[in-house]
């Protein structure tokens, strides 16, 4: 047991932790545990300093708000994804799910315009529909994975194709566009702000805080971590594994629904390219945030920082001309690999 | 062709625990030696040293009179020493031939020569009397055939000393006879063999000589022909029990039956089992490896499929479909597999302790402060030795992990607790602590079930012991009848 423990400490120390700082076991653990959480934050701070140095307009409030608003969609989905990954699962379908929910939500709202007098009520009903559909799709994933005993990778790989194909079918290969009467009423949900902070950012903050509370201070959160660490132990310890795992997918589905509700007024339409590759961005945000892909341990703070970090990279590339913006994905990819390298645990 | 072996003052330490003390004896050429001893006597460790899986801390191993030190099993195999493990270790998805030549494939011009490997594999399969295509996948074989493949693999490595560790645990009587035929054949060919088994009738039948170990020490050796099974059992045990075990408090006459199990079947493992446990009673479950004890209780908890029968708690019929149902009804289970099913080693002690009763700390949000208080209390009550309460479970020693696992299953406050191998891999000091803890639970009015492979532990601790054999409950022995001989006789079917 002894060597395993020391290994764990060394692994926990994470990026740049000098070994000489660990003379006593117990303080070292909490110190290194804190470092673990600080790693992504330190990376983000360094990146922001670099961004400001390269282009002074990076630090402008308007630019920062712009980055945060764009982050909020992936960020909200990442919070849900964080639970799924910590429980030992994965969801590859979230990008397609955004497209499907967006398209069917617009269709429903367009259909309701004639029947319901108030456009506000139409939008409220549309939002309720989006969240419900997200929850139901998540439930379907959860049931197939737990009751059907199919690997999460396979289930969501299948629905990744299904969701986008259904949207393409509904859109007849083109785009589904929101009724003009609605878009004016709906647009403040994306473009509006409260106390100078855009609405999507407020929602992102609320979801992140809620996610943090759920993960760290509820039985559900503890069970999710237990299942991801060792599903057998959880099962033997009277944890309802199937229900808990299913709920992680339902929560992710609701997060996807919320992200979609915020995203629809931005363009006012849904097409076969809506939400394309969002699943990989969301997974990347969780991993960059320090959550192990095999599950067990992870933090919401890390996930939020990871999501922001990835979009800051894109923003800096946009603002500077050192590296072509076409290489955005390549830089993000390199960051993911570097982070994974720094956080690798014992073999 | 055959090998002689001599152990000289072999000691082996695992951390601070010494598991082999100054073991010294020799094994003559071409004979079949039975190695006897209880679980924990050190047989397996000694055999691992002989087969190169472990190195002695001190002492010497002589092979054919020459001091030898194997750095790995490969070196031992080169010397002709092959250990056949209790669990079959073949790659299921490879063919027989691929398994036999795994790691030492025959190549021609850099590519695998499958024809040559199949041809040679057929030869070795014929040696063990297995008529089967060497290109068959191992997953398609039955257990006995896999065992024969293991032996064929050993022969192909030119084995001159064969160690068989509980080879018949999963074999039918017919298959066992076939294996014995093979052992006899090898003896004629001059292969030295070491046969480890708890089944004394087999040892009596097949070995030339027995060597007895106890508590990590060599005890004695004798020709098999001069020993009765009773004498073998006595040699294995022969130990002072005195204060290792707490005194047995009699179960009050009017104590109600808390758990009653009637005619429960767990397909493939246990058939038509009935028993009951009363408040304040410690009921033991004895049996050989594979007798179906663990599987019976996993079935009762809904972790395996169960057929028919009734389960009554406090005189009410209950449906137990999962450990969650069981915990709600006040029944909890400590798994024999501490690392795989008992504790989350990467979690802190606190999170492990409260996992089964977490709702108690949710109001509605979890209160880490209350959890910490509970942990401090549990550390005190269960005598868990740890530096810091925030330590991970993986930092604890085996004995302290086991105490934490016990604290965990008792945390919900069950009325019936099932402890499967509660002292596995634990040193004597921690064992004693755990025995006294179990005694205390019974005194508090819990119904306690102890499943154990250590007969002395069951005799020392339990009010009654149920003996299982091949999925059937053979007998339930009362305190007065509890002797090692009786238990072994029922467990092996030699009563």
Image (cartoon, grey):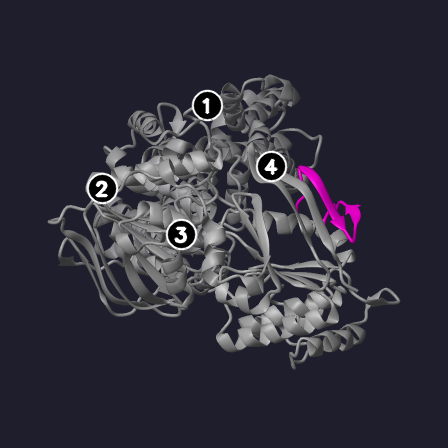
Which numbered marker is on residue B153?
none
First in residue order: circle 4 vs circle 3: 4
Q: Earlier in the sequence, mark 1 or mark 4?
A: 4
What secondary structure is marked by label 2? loop
Chain part drawn in magenta: B53-72
Vertical side of B371 occupied by A89: above or below? below
Q: Are marks 4 and 3 in contact (CB under 8 Å)?
A: no
Quickly name the residue at label 2: B249
Tell which tag, 3 or 1, sits nearer the viewer.
3
Residue B243: give x, y in percent of width and height: 36, 36
Q: Which mark is residue B387?
A: 1
- Mark 1 or 2, which is nearer the eye? 2
**Magenta run includes residue B491:** no
Residue B372 in view: yes
State how far apart marks 2 and 4 are (Cα).
37 Å
Residue B410 appears left or right of B288: left
Secondary element under disc 3, as helix, strand or loop, is helix
Chain bearing mark 3: B
Residue A223 horizontal/vertical position (percent): 36, 43
- Tell me, yes or no, whether the two marked residues, 2 and 4, touch with CB atoms within 8 Å: no
Residue at mark 1 shares a chain with residue at mark 2: yes
- Which residue corresponds to mark 4? B13
Determine the CA span between mark 1 and mark 2: 35 Å
B223 lies left or right of B30: left
Distance CA(mark 1)–CA(mark 4): 23 Å
């Amino acid at each position: 047991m002894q060597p395993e423990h020391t290994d764990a400490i060394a692994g926990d120390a994470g990026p740049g932790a000098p070994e000489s700082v660990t003379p006593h076991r117990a303080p070292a653990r909490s110190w290194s545990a804190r470092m673990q959480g600080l790693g992504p934050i330190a990376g983000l701070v360094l990146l922001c300093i670099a961004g400001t140095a390269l282009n002074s307009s990076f630090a402008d409030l308007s630019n920062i708000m712009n980055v945060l608003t764009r982050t909020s969609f992936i960020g909200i989905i990442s919070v849900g994804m964080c639970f799924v990954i910590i429980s030992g699962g994965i969801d590859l379908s979230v990008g397609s799910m955004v497209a499907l929910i967006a398209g069917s939500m617009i269709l429903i709202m367009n259909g309701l315009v004639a029947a319901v007098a108030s456009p506000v009520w139409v939008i409220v009903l549309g939002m309720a529909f989006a969240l419900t559909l997200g929850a139901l799709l998540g439930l379907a994933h959860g049931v197939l994975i737990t009751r059907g005993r199919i690997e999460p990778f396979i289930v969501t790989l299948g629905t990744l194709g299904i969701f986008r194909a259904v949207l393409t079918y509904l859109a007849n290969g083109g785009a589904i566009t929101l009724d003009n009467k609605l878009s004016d009423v709906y647009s403040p949900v994306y473009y509006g702000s409260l106390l100078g902070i855009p609405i999507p950012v407020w929602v992102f903050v609320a979801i992140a805080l809620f996610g943090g509370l759920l993960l760290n201070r509820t039985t559900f959160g503890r069970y999710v971590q237990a299942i991801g660490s060792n599903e057998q132990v959880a099962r033997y310890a009277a944890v309802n594994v199937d229900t808990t795992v299913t709920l992680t997918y339902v929560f992710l589905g609701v997060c996807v629904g919320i992200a979609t509700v915020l995203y629809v007024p931005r363009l006012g339409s849904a097409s076969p390219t809506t939400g394309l590759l969002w699943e990989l961005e969301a997974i990347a945000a969780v991993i960059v945030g320090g959550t192990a892909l095999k599950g067990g341990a992870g933090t919401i703070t890390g996930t939020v920082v990871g999501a922001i970090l990835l979009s800051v990279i894109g923003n800096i590339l946009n603002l500077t001309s050192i590296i072509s913006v076409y290489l955005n994905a390549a830089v993000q990819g390199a960051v993911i690999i570097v982070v994974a390298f720094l956080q690798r645990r014992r073999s | 062709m055959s090998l002689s072996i001599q152990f000289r003052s072999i000691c082996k330490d695992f951390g601070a625990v010494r598991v082999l003390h100054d073991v010294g004896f020799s094994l003559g050429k071409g004979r079949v030696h039975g190695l006897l001893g209880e679980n924990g006597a050190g047989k397996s460790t000694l055999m691992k040293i002989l087969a190169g899986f472990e190195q002695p801390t001190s002492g010497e191993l002589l092979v054919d009179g020459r001091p030898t030190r194997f750095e790995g099993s490969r070196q031992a195999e080169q010397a002709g020493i092959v250990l056949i493990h209790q669990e079959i270790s073949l790659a299921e998805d490879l063919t027989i031939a691929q398994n036999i030549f795994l790691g030492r494939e025959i190549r021609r011009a850099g590519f695998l020569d499958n024809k040559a490997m199949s041809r040679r594999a057929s030869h070795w399969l014929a040696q063990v009397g297995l008529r089967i295509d060497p290109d068959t996948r191992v997953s398609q074989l039955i257990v006995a055939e896999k065992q024969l493949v293991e032996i064929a693999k050993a022969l192909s490595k030119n084995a001159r000393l064969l160690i068989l560790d509980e080879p018949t645990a999963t074999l039918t009587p017919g298959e066992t006879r076939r294996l014995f035929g093979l052992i006899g054949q090898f003896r004629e060919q001059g292969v030295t063999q070491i046969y480890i088994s708890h089944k004394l009738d087999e040892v009596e039948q097949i070995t030339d000589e027995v060597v007895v170990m106890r508590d990590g020490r060599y005890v004695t050796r004798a020709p098999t022909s001069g020993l009765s099974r009773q004498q073998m059992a006595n040699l294995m045990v022969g130990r002072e029990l005195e204060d290792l075990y707490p005194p047995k408090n009699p179960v009050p006459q009017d104590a109600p039956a808390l758990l009653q199990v009637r005619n429960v079947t767990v397909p493939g493992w246990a058939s038509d089992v009935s028993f009951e446990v009363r408040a304040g009673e410690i009921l033991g479950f004895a049996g050989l490896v594979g007798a179906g004890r663990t599987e019976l209780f996993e079935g009762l908890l809904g972790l395996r499929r169960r057929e028919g029968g009734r389960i009554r708690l406090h005189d009410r019929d209950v449906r137990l479909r999962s450990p969650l149902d069981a915990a709600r009804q006040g029944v909890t289970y400590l798994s024999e597999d501490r690392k795989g099913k008992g504790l989350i080693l990467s979690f802190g002690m606190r999170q492990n302790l409260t996992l089964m009763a977490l709702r108690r700390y949710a109001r509605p949000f979890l209160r880490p402060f209350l959890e910490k208080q509970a942990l401090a209390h549990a550390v005190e009550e269960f005598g868990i030795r740890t530096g810091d309460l925030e330590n991970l479970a993986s930092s604890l020693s085996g004995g302290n992990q086991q105490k934490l696992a016990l604290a965990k299953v008792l945390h919900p406050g069950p009325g019936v607790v099932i402890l499967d191998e509660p002292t596995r891999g634990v040193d004597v000091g921690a064992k004693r602590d755990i025995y006294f803890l179990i005694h205390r639970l019974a005194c508090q009015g819990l119904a306690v079930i102890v499943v154990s492979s250590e007969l002395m532990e069951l005799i020392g601790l339990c009010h009654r012991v149920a003996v299982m054999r091949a999925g059937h409950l053979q007998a339930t022995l009362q305190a007065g009848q509890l002797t090692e001989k009786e238990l072994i006789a029922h467990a092996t079917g030699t009563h």
